Image: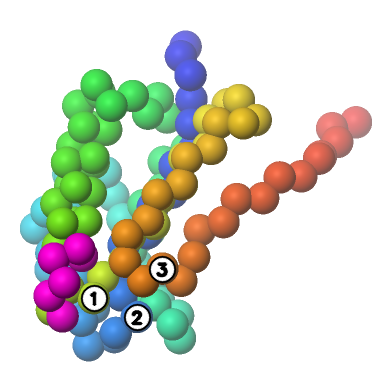
Amino acid sequence: MGYRSEIKAVFYTDDKEKWPVLKLYLDENFPNEWSLEPIESKHCYGYLFSADDVKWYPSYTDVAAFNKFVDAYRNLISSGEDSFPWVYEFVRIGEDTTDIEHDSEGNCSYLLTVSRSIETDF
């Protein structure tokens, strides 16, 4: 069965004029194994990646492809060029209650947050 995680990542910009360039970059470079859904608000324009109940092991081919893409994307953001005013946020929640990973690059709007709650099933 294996250890499972829930994953969310967002790739976005706060500059609507830069959104088409971001879309083109993602269309050409985001791993084919995964899909993205567009997001748009008053403050950000981008794409959401979601994976639920997934084995998120770096040695897995699809996870390695995602991580390779993120490394390249982060390098563009940190290059300091104005043509890439992009942002990246990532959250992984594992099965263990203390297993939460958060990562980001760029001028984050903190679109991804983690909250805990107690629910009943009776």
Q: Considering depth in this image, is 50 or 106 the residue closer to the camera?
A: 106
What is the spatial separation of the Cα atoms under label 1 and label 2, in whole angstroms?
8 Å
Q: Main secondary structure of the magenta part?
A: loop
Q: Quadrant of residue 17?
A: bottom left
Report helix, strand or loop for mark 1.
Answer: loop
Question: Dot 2, how many residues are within 10 Å of its Cα: few (below 14), some (14-19), or many (20+)?
Answer: many
Residue 16 located left or right of residue 119: left
State how far apart marks 3 and 2 are (Cα). 9 Å
First in sequence: mark 3 vs mark 1: 1
Determine the residue located farthest toward the right in the rendered image: 122
Q: Does the segment drawn in magenta span residue 69?
A: no
- According to the image, label 1 marks what residue? 85
Q: Amino acid at mark 3?
A: Cys
Q: Marks 3/1: CA distance?
A: 11 Å
Q: Which residue is mark 3?
A: 108
The mark nearer the N terminus, 1 or 2, is 2
On screen, residue 26 above or below 3 = below
Dots 1 and 2: beta carbons under 8 Å?
yes
Percent x, y of residue 27: 14, 60
The stretch of residues the image draws in magenta is 77-82
Q: Amino acid at mark 1?
A: Pro
Q: Please tell me the numbered disc located at residue 14.
A: 2
Give the residue drawn at x 49%, y 65%. Answer: 110
Which numbered disc flags the more N-terminal residue, 3 or 2? Answer: 2
